[in-house]
Image (cartoon, rainbow, N blue to C red):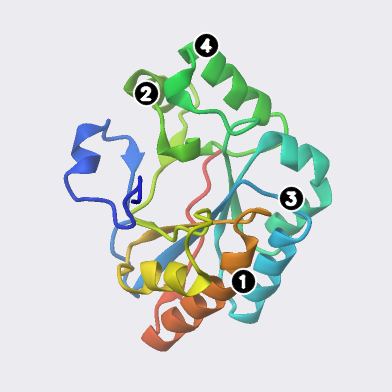
Amino acid sequence: MRSYWVKTPKWLPALFPKELVWKMPQQEAPTVYLTFDDGPHPEATPFVLDLLKEYNARATFFCIGKNVAFQPELYKRILQEGHTTGNHTEDHLNGWRHSNYRYLSNIFSAGRHIQSKNFRPPYGRIKMSQARQLSRAKHPWKIFMWDVLSGDFDTTLTGEECLQNVVQHVEPGSIVVFHDSAKALPRLKEALPGVLEFCKNKDWKLKALPEYY
C-alpha cells in the first residue's frame, strides 16, 4: 500500500503556512512545471537535460548540496541550459526528525553550493516553525511543494505506472516531481519521455519555476 499521495489532496495545503507553494497560478498559455529532486547525478541528470533540450522544455532542479559539490560542472550545465535550481538540503535531511537549528544549518550548508532561495523539503517533511523561519528571513526563501508526484522513487512501480501517475493527474499550473537519481533512473527513463510527449500533444508550455535569490 502506498504511503504517499500521487495527487495532493486539495485540503492539504490549507494545513500549512501560506508561504508554501503547491501549484502555480494560471498563465496566459497553459503551463506545467516539471521539477527534479536529489541531483545532480552523473547519469540521471544528463539524461534529463538531453531530453529537456530535445523538447525545448525548461524545468527546475532541487539539488542536494553535497551532490553539487561532487558534480559542479553538471550544476553549471543546468543553469547554462536555462533551467532554475533550488536547495534540497545538504544531505537530504528530514525536517520532522531534526531540531530547527540542525535543519536550517543543513540548508545553509547547501547554500554554499546552490545560489538560490528556492527550497523544497526532502520527503515534503518540514515543520511549520521551520517553514516560517525560512519564509520570514531577512532574505526570504520560497518553499515549493507539488501537486503531482510521479512515484519514480518507488521501486515497486514500473515506468509505465509512473507515467500514468502523471498524465492522469497533471493539469495547467501543476508542479510535478521527478528525481534525477540512481534509484529513480530506471522508471524515469520510461516515464519522462511519455510525459514530455503528452504535454507537447496538449500544447502545454513546460517552464521552470521562478528563481529567487
Q: What residue lies at 44% left-to-right and 75% top-to-bottom? A: 205
Indicate the position of residue 159 as horizontal and vertical percent values: 52, 70
Tell me which numbered mark, 3 or 1, is placed earlier along the sequence: 3
Q: Which mark is residue 75?
A: 3
Q: Nearer the viewer, residue 113 or 27?
A: 113
Q: Secondary structure at mark 3?
A: helix
Which amino acid is tagged 3? Tyr
Which amino acid is tagged 4? Tyr
Quarter of the figure with the C terminus: top right
Indicate the position of residue 28 as horizontal and vertical percent values: 31, 72
Q: What residue lies at 82% left-to-right and 41% top-to-bottom? A: 70
Q: Secondary structure at mark 4?
A: helix
Q: Quadrant of residue 13?
A: top left
Tell me which numbered mark, 4 or 2, is placed earlier along the sequence: 4
Q: What residue lies at 22% left-to-right and 42% top-to-bottom? A: 12
Q: Secondary structure at mark 2?
A: loop
Tell me which numbered mark, 3 or 2, is placed earlier along the sequence: 3
Q: CA distance from mark 4 to mark 2?
A: 12 Å
Query: Cβ–Cβ below 8 Å for labels 1 and 4?
Result: no
Which amino acid is tagged 1? Lys
From the image, tell me which residue sits under label 2.
127
Q: CA distance from mark 1 to mark 4?
A: 38 Å
Looking at the image, residue 186 sits to the left or right of residue 135; the answer is right
Q: What residue lies at 76% left-to-right and 58% top-to-bottom? A: 77
| Residue 107 in the image: above or below residue 78 | above
Q: CA distance from mark 4 to mark 3?
A: 27 Å
Looking at the image, residue 76 sits to the left or right of residue 19; the answer is right
From the image, tell me which residue sits under label 1.
189
Tell me which numbered mark, 1 or 4, is placed earlier along the sequence: 4
Q: Which mark is residue 101?
A: 4
Q: Is residue 137 visible?
A: no
